[in-house]
Amino acid sequence: MIQQISDAELEIMKIIWGNPQEVTLFPHIMDGLAARGKPCQKNTLIVLLSRLMNKGFLSARKIGRRNEYTMLISETEYQTAQTKNFLDKIYEGSAKGLVSNLISGDLLADEEYEELKRLLEKGKGKQ
């Protein structure tokens, strides 16, 4: 089971998931947080990265004086686990309830509605 992470940890993971490189360096994460308007102190970032490693999201390898961080859980894996958790908690596992709420609550843009409709018509096959 994939653990839930804090908002601050999620911001870090978004930077790592968005990095096209296999490994992410500490300065890249610091710069990414600053670019997102969420600057972080060095020691705070070290603690957050340590928590992510303890939760099984990252591994780290020390190369000289720098750490290289590698994701162990993909963004899609995390999104799927969180979506299932959300469905179970809020809609008692009913995806139909969620979709119905999105439609009846007017929470979908027209193009999102049409895309969702196409996906449903296409069936359960992979995209």
Image (tube, rainbow, N blue to C red):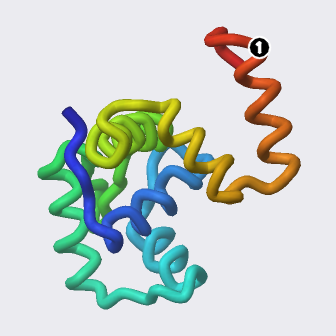
Q: Position of residue 41 (x, y in %)?
A: 31, 90
> In this picture, is 94 found above or below 31?
above
Q: Residue at x 79, y 43 (%)?
A: 113
Q: Nearer the viewer, residue 5 or 36?
A: 5
Where is residue 9? Give x, y as percent: 31, 66
Q: Position of residue 45 (x, y in %)?
A: 28, 77
Amino acid type, callout 1: Lys
- Based on the displayed image, in which of its 4 quarters is residue 119 positioned? top right
Q: Is residue 107 above or below residue 36?
A: above
| Total numbered badges shown on the rendered structure | 1
Image quadrant of residue 83?
top left
**Residue at image location 59% in from the left, 82% down from the top:** 35
Residue 81 vs residue 24, the one in the foreground: 81
Question: Where the N terminus falls, by quadrant?
Answer: top left
Identify the image quadrant of the C terminus: top right
Outermost residue toward the front in this view: 104
What residue would you read off at disc 1?
122
Mark 1 Cα shell of 10 Å, populated few (<14), some (14-19), many (≥20)? few
The structure residue drawn at horizontal position 65% and vertical position 14%, both measured from the top left corner, is 126
Q: Residue 12 or 87: which is nearer the viewer?
A: 87
Q: Is residue 122 visible from the viewing direction of this image?
A: yes
- Does residue 70 appear to the left or right of 102 in the view shown? left
Seen in the picture, residue 68 relative to 8 is either above or below; the reply is above
- In this rendered view, identify the residue nearer to me: 43 or 126: 126
* Left or right of 83 on screen, residue 37: right
Asked if residue 73 shows in the view, the reply is no
Residue in the picture at 77% in, 16% down:
121
Q: Is residue 86 left or right of residue 107?
A: left
